Image: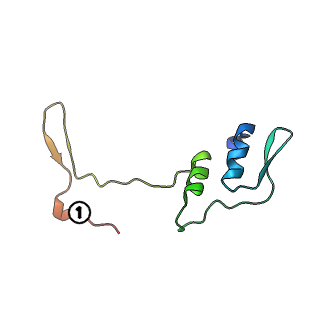
């Protein structure tokens, strides 16, 4: 994480982090991680604790994609087709 984005956590979050399994403690009012901690690894299924930790740290767990095949123009009511149904590729 870039240093400019590494902001200290509020001390009130420390009990919640500990409850979610992170080895944390308060040291002079600062949330401190006692040892290295891996929240998850790529490709593994996440449990509710892992998803809450990722959300707390602002890490997106999903990617949203669409294949735009057409759109409706509000101004004139026309439908613009960008790609025919048989032209679409199916992604795995």
Residue nearest the viewer, comparing 44 with 7: 44
Q: Is residue 78 above or below residue 55?
A: above
Element type at mark 1: loop
Q: Position of residue 51 (x, y in %)?
A: 55, 54
Which residue is at the far right? 28
Which of the image's four quarters has the C terminus? bottom left
Residue drawn at 13 percent across, 32 percent down: 76
Please give the count of numbered marks on the rendered protein: 1
Residue drawn at 16 percent across, 58 percent down: 84
Residue drawn at 80 percent across, 48 percent down: 25
Q: Position of residue 53 (x, y in %)?
A: 61, 51
Q: Position of residue 31 (x, y in %)?
A: 77, 44
Q: Which residue is mark 1?
A: 88
Residue drawn at 20 percent across, 51 percent down: 82
Q: Is residue 21 above or below residue 13?
A: below
Q: Position of residue 13 (x, y in %)?
A: 69, 41
Position of 82 with respect to 67 (left or right) is left
- Report if residue 3 is visible in the image: no
Position of 27 with respect to 23 (left or right) is right
- Report the colour scheme: rainbow
Looking at the rendering, which quadrant does residue 39 occupy? bottom right
- Report if residue 7 is visible in the image: yes
Q: Residues within 10 Å of mark 1 (few under 14, many from 20)?
A: few
Q: Is residue 54 above or below residue 9?
A: below
């Amino acid at each position: 994480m870039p240093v400019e984005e590494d902001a200290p956590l509020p001390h009130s979050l420390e009990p919640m982090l500990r409850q979610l399994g992170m080895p944390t403690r308060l040291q002079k009012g600062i949330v401190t991680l006692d040892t290295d901690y891996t929240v998850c690894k790529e490709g593994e299924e996440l449990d509710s604790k892992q998803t809450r930790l990722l959300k707390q740290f602002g890490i997106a767990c999903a990617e949203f994609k669409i294949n735009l095949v057409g759109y409706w123009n509000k101004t004139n009511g026309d439908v613009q087709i960008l790609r025919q149904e048989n032209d679409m590729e199916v992604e795995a």
